[in-house]
Image (spheres, rainbow, N blue to C red):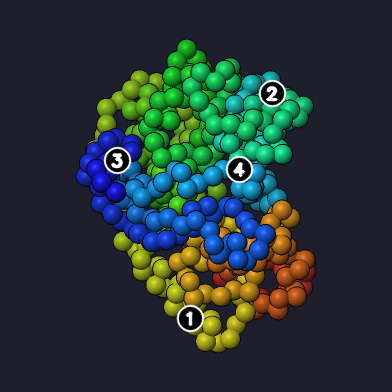
Amino acid sequence: MTDVVCRSCGHAALATVFDAPSVPVENSRLYADEASARAVARGDLVIQQCERCGFVQNSAFDPTLVVYDDDYEDAQGHSAVFQAFATRVIDELIDTYDLQGARALEIGCGNGDFLRRFCAASGGTGVGLDPALGSDAGVDGPVELRAESFTTGSGHFDADVVICRHTLEHVPDIAAFLALVRAELADRPEVVLYLEVPDTGRIADEAAFWDVYFEHCSYVDEGGFADLLQRSGFAVVQSRLDYDGQYLVTHARLGTRQPIVARDSQLDFSALADSVDHWRRWANELDEHGRRAAVWAASSKAVAFLSALPDFAPVVAVDINPAKAGRHLPGSGLGVCGPDDLPGYEVDTVVVMNPVYMDEIRAELDRVGVQAELVGLGA
């Protein structure tokens, strides 16, 4: 790490706000056996904040360590809570910008579930780009999914709406990426961008260290993201926090480039280390009382949480995504089961990785007959 500068504004003054050595580099990749899951590639977290624009980055990020392919599993569509959220934001986009019959482009489309939902609601067509696409790639009715990254001049940009959900946080040079998008839209000022990223302000406020992991090399909050978009040549149409304050949702169009705005204040990440210590003490007390714990879900949050608590030994991770059952989490090697198999593990504590799903999880536990204390991160 020499000559590190802010990847958003190029400033050379960066302050380290959190660090964690030797964490798994691919939190959403699951493994067939415990040994393989433990023997994963690792990298360092050196989370730094720009003292001028407030942008937050993992300055130790090495893109060569992260491979997005068919084994990268981060689909959320199995949750009714998430489905309701997706339906709401899709309906809002279509109604607000008159996108009936629209052509949509999604950059970083995952398995294409959101794009399919959008096209079904709009009656239009869509192209999705994602290097992690494997067997999902191909043409399915009005939707075409391509196993590739977005590049300028790709010929895929004849779109009325551009969707980019939970992708920008994976992009190390976020300013250069936005410049590519702007170049493609140079003669299409009417095109609307729908951008969705994790809110870094919440991570700082809740000391949510479980939301800081290697693949997420870029972190923005509402004010900082608006400044970044404006100096990249976009006009922010609307911006808000959504999904229980976890997601920053932004609508933007082409605008006039604005100069860099120095932040009046920085996000305060000082509580992150204390939060790690708190949960380590909690895990020790759980072990001292002989309690058997499960974590719900087999997610990036779970991998980050377990990496920070190496002595915490839950007996299983639970996930409603059937593609994850029988697999193992990177780093800890913890096995994954579906809700129907949880009774066999005789757990008395379930650690809920995302409290937005608390009611849904409680209903699943009631359905399978498991009586357990629910403990939510950040709740």
Q: CA distance from mark 4 to mark 1?
A: 37 Å
Q: Is residue 112 visible?
A: yes
Tell me the element at label 2.
Answer: strand
Looking at the picture, which amino acid does disc 3 mark?
A: Cys
| Residue ID for mark 2 | 125
Horizontal and vertical percent for residue 41? Answer: 49, 56
Q: CA distance from mark 2 to mark 3?
A: 38 Å
Q: Residue furthest top?
A: 187
Taking the spot 44% from the left edge, 43% from the top edge, the residue there is 63
Q: CA distance from mark 1 to mark 2?
A: 53 Å
Taking the spot 58% from the left edge, 21% from the top edge, the residue there is 156
Q: CA distance from mark 1 to mark 3?
A: 38 Å
Q: Return the mark for residue 284.
A: 1
- Circle nearer the N terminus (4, 2): 4
Q: Is residue 317 visible?
A: no
Q: Residues within 10 Å of mark 3 (few under 14, many from 20)?
A: many
- Circle nearer the N terminus (1, 2): 2
| Residue ID for mark 4 | 69
- Which callout, 4 or 1, points to the residue nearer the camera? 4
Tell me the element at label 3.
Answer: loop
Q: Is residue 267 left or right of residue 355?
A: left
- Circle nearer the N terminus (1, 3): 3
- Which callout, 2 or 3, points to the residue nearer the camera? 3
Tell me the element at label 4.
Answer: loop
- Circle nearer the N terminus (4, 1): 4
Horizontal and vertical percent for residue 269? Answer: 33, 57
Looking at the picture, which amino acid does disc 1 mark?
A: Asn
| Residue ID for mark 3 | 6
Horizontal and vertical percent for residue 246? Answer: 50, 50
